[in-house]
Every structure is written in structure tokens, then in C-alpha cells.
Amino acid sequence: MKKFKSIELFAGAGGLALGLEQAGFEHIGLVEIDRYACETLSINRPEWNILCEDVEEVSQRDLEKEFHIKKGELDLLSGGAPCQSFSYAGKRLGIEDVRGTMFYHYATFLHKLQPKMFLFENVRGLLSHDKGKTYRTILDIFEDEGYKIFYKILNAWDFGVPQKRERLITVGIRKDLYSKTFFEYPKPYSYKPLLKDIKLDCNPNSEQCAKYSETKAKIFSLVPPGGCWRDIDPEIAKEYMKSCWNMEGGRTGILRRISLDEPSLTVLTNPGMKQTDRCHPLEVRPFSYRENARFQTFPDDWIFCGKLSDKYRQVGNAVPVNLAKEIGKQIIKSLERGI
């Protein structure tokens, strides 16, 4: 079977890269600046060509020479650039509109290498940021670079991931290939997994799991699985929530204890934030970083490097592996049709 070649930017701990590998891609380069994430990538896939550098510096080099591939030959450019706010003056300056942002470096790779397809992953909030102007600018640049664009919000829970996690998935096909192929998003699975389907740790140690303070643990012990602050004595909840008590909205993320009969909420980078608590259903503690990794569909033999906080951050920032695999399989179908 033909191995399709890809380059990934902002690779993190490898959730997207691993899923694309499982789909059938061969990574000829991954760029990531965080040293612990680079160690994670290296220890799990020593054969990958990992550039532990600032993507800004890499993007300014001769990319054809750097990755030993000619312009137009790369099958896929993937990654999820952090998209800081930038203004859109309506002058259609193209790639110059976003100079100085992290997206600019993704766009530079796209401009210099002209891959057959690209995958751009980001938070769903990008779609509405600045009343849609930010994402409209990004789409204009993709189109100006010669791509037919597809975009859709996908929930990882629909694709074998035991977690509610919505992501904006943007896919592009180079216009000279679009007459020969098309792209379809993956179809949802018939079964959506719950926590009861996932292996949970038993009393993990301090190297594997963050701990609650004695006071917080005592309060969480009052919350039933599937419940939150609303399910305990209002006076106790009010004392714990302090200023959050007067906030508008449901605030159901506060003192939230997940049930075995539901999926994980979106896995975050820090397990101890008051407004986004996720307590274990069987034990009074946060989920361990390894449990979070399972919610992201990382295999248990995928090693994460760094301190405990680094591991939580890497897992929380990752693309769910199984979601990436299903998108990757659809991209390969597009590429096979276009050959």
C-alpha cells in the first residue's frame, strides 16, 4: 500500500500524528517547540524526524531542502496553529494579513510546499471569533493559495472517543486536484463510548495523579456521580464557590463529578481549575493523566515526558487519536481518488 507523506506543525504530544499514522500516513517531519512534548514524540517514535524548534524559524528556511521533497509533492500538511486575534481590514492582502501570528507560519508552509491536501484543526470557538472575521480571513488565505475548502465541527464522542470534545476541522484540496477527487467527513460510529467502557486507575500515586486539598476532597465526597454543586447543601456550595456563586449560567462545571454512564467532559490541561472540575466517579480525586490519555484514545504504551503538570498539559492539548485516524482515513481516500 502506498504510504502518503505528511508534515505536521504544532505537533504537541502526538495525538494528531499518531492518528494519522494509524490511518496510513508516513510523517517526514514534525515541528514542536515544547521540549517535553518533543521528548514524548522522540521516545515513542524515535524514527520520526522531529524538529524541536520554533515553527517561525523553520518556516523561513528552504523547506524543500529541509524535508527533501519538491514543491507540490507533499501529500498532507497538518496541524492546529494557535490563532491569536488579528484584524481584517478588508484589503485582501492575502498571507500578509496575518503576519506576526502563529497561523502565518502554517500559511507559509502551505505557500512554500503546496501540499496536495491540508488538515487544519482548531477549537470550535474560532468559527465565531470576532464575529467570524478571524476565520473568514483564514479561509480567504487558504483559497488564495489555491485550495478548495471544507470545514465542519466534529464531536470526538461520535468517533469512538469517550469524551465530549468539539473541534473545528478544516480540510483543503489543491484546486488542480479537485476536478479528480472530493472530500467527505467521516460518518459517526453507531456506539458512543462511556466512562464505564474505559479502564480506570485504582488509587494512583502522586506521580500519576493530582490531588485535592483536604477541604476540597471533603466537599467533593458529598457530590454524587453525575452531579455538581447543585446536589449538595447550598450553604456548603456557596462557601466553596465564593464569587462564582453570583455568576450567571448553569455553572455545572463547578464541583462536577462524572458518572460512569456518561463520557468525559472535554479533557483540559489543568485538572484543578475550580470552574472546570472533573472528579472521578469512584474515588474522590481528579482523573489521572493516564486516564485523561485514555479519554483522548492514546494507547497505554504511549509515554508522556516531563513533570506531572507537563503530562497533564500535553494530554489536554492533544487531538483525540481516534478522531485524527478517522479524518486521516477520509483524506487518504481523497488522495487515492486524485492520483
Image (cartoon, helix red, strand yellow):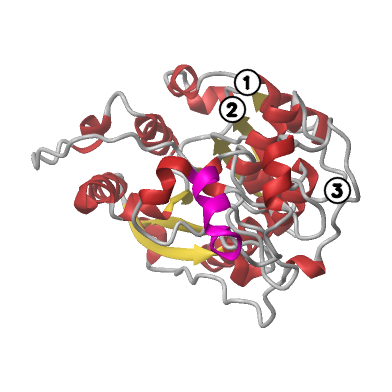
Dot 3 or dot 1, earlier in sequence: 1
- Pointer 2 with pointer 1, Cβ within 8 A: yes
Three-letter code, disc 3: Asp
Residue visible at 34% across and 56% down? 248
Which region of the structure is painted magenta? 229-241
Is 231 covered by the magenta stretch?
Answer: yes
Outermost residue toward the front?
A: 235
Three-letter code, disc 2: Glu
Q: Which residue is mark 1?
A: 52
Residue 163, picture quadrant: bottom right
Q: Does the rendering let one see residue 201?
A: yes
Outermost residue toward the right?
A: 202
- Pointer 2 with pointer 3, Cβ within 8 A: no
Q: Position of residue 2 (x, y in %)?
A: 70, 56
Cα separation, mark 2 vs mark 1, equals: 5 Å
Residue 45, picture quadrant: top right
Q: Which mark is residue 237?
A: none
Q: Which residue is mark 2?
A: 32
Q: Which residue is mark 3?
A: 300
